[in-house]
Amino acid sequence: MAAELLAGGPGVLMRPMSIVRAALCLVASLSLWACPATEKTGGGAKAPPDSPSSGPASQPGSVPGDHTTSTTPVSLDDLFKMPKTPPVVLKVGEVEVGREVLENKLRQMQLQLSATGIPEGTTRSEVLKGAIDQLIEYEFTMLMAKNLGVKEDKKAIDVWVKDLEERMEAEPAFKALLLRAGNSREQRLKDAKFMVTAEGVTTKLLERLRTKTATALRGYYDSHQADYMEHAGVEAWRIHLKAPAGMTQQDRDSARLRAMDVEKKARKKPGDFESLAKHYSEGGNATTGGYLGFVGRGTFAPALEEQIFAAKPNTILPLYEDPGGFYIYKVGKRREARVKKYEDVEEQIFQTFVRGFLHKEVEKERVKLREATAIEVFVPELASKPTP
């Protein structure tokens, strides 16, 4: 669920993507082509998928000789050649990003596009802008985390890396893929830090929202109580032994005897009903111990319904038969119609509306960063200058 990240402040050249998309893009090789390749970012650039390998991207300073404009379509190899740049390719606030980081990003992106294919119309300029967008996104996420007081969770980072490396060892092809993308342990730690930090940002914003939206959520509940009505019902469990139409009478009689045996066991130890259901039942609720929840009027055939609603709690009903087979029911407690308490549905309401609330909250953070942070890109091939 995501929060759109900020577009930066004075000197912004491109608009970053969402936290989640950036996280996926930054580690696309980890999640096997998770980053979309065709969505346009601010500044007119498509945000291409994340990336490749040893090869063209590792050749510093090699710009296509026939590349006369930034929008001329070129081959896959040419798309990802490392441009000539100074040692610092990007500055976000006071943070400087080195050319080796851009080179690694291009390598990741090339690897992905090698597998998924080049989106029609992709240009060299768009690839470079997409790579820069992702680097900006990383730094903005870290800056937002700092502003919100998100602390580095080293334990979560270690778990993230451990899970990834266990998968690498279990899947040699996956491991080779990451290594081709230049995914060193240092890079894995950086990716893990980003993922965990992005999650921490979302968590912080949600915590803030719980306080800010408490009145609105309560107001919604008060005006929509009909949506949270629990109808009267009786708790029930069921064991079903199938005896479908068309079977011989001998087989049906045999199924009846098995059902009677199970009924006898259930009556002897009602507390074992769920275990018996898991062992003997052939119905769809067998895995949950035959639990049906609270059933209301009109759920069953009239004769069976009367037995269920007349029974006392913890009662095993007489064996019930219909054309589909034999059924043993256990009846639990009765529940009268009621409206669920606000405390019981508060989280449900919050989750229902959190997307809209979260968007507004992130917009506030975006404005703060836009006003406070300058972004400069030092890639001559993009031929762009910071806005004054």
Image (cartoon, grey):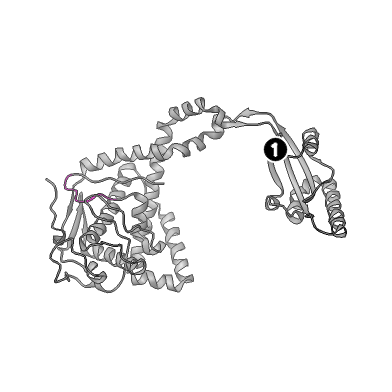
User: For the stretch drawn in magenta, what is the main secondary structure?
Assistant: loop
Which residue corresponds to mark 1?
A: 295
11 magenta-colored: yes
User: Magenta segment, which residues?
Assistant: 10-16
In depth, the one of 96 and 114 nearer the eye is 114
Q: Position of residue 190 (x, y in %)?
A: 34, 59
| Residue at image location 31% in from the left, 49% down from the top | 141
- Position of 348 compared to 1: left or right? right
Residue at x-position 31% and y-position 57%:
38
Q: Residue at x 39, y 73 (%)?
A: 176
- Farthest residue in the front direction? 246
Q: Quadrant of residue 116?
A: bottom left
Count of numbered tags:
1
Q: Callout 1: 10 Å neighbours few (<14), some, many (20+)?
A: many
Above or below for 111 versus 290 = below
x then y, percent, for residue 341: 57, 29
Indicate the quadrant where residue 32 lies: bottom left
Question: Where does the C terminus fall, quadrant-wise?
Answer: top left
Front in this rendered view, residue 263 or 186: 263
In front: 122, or 171? 122
Residue 78, image x, y percentages: 22, 70
The magenta stretch spans residue 29: no
Q: In which image quadrant can residue 207 be found? A: top left
Type of the residue with mark 1? Val
Q: Would you place residue 328 above or below residue 50 in this image?
A: above
Query: What residue sits 37% from the left and 57% below the top?
Result: 24
What SS does tag 1 mark? strand
Q: Is residue 57 left or right of residue 198?
A: left
Residue 34: x %, y % from top left: 39, 59
Q: Is residue 110 above or below residue 151?
A: below
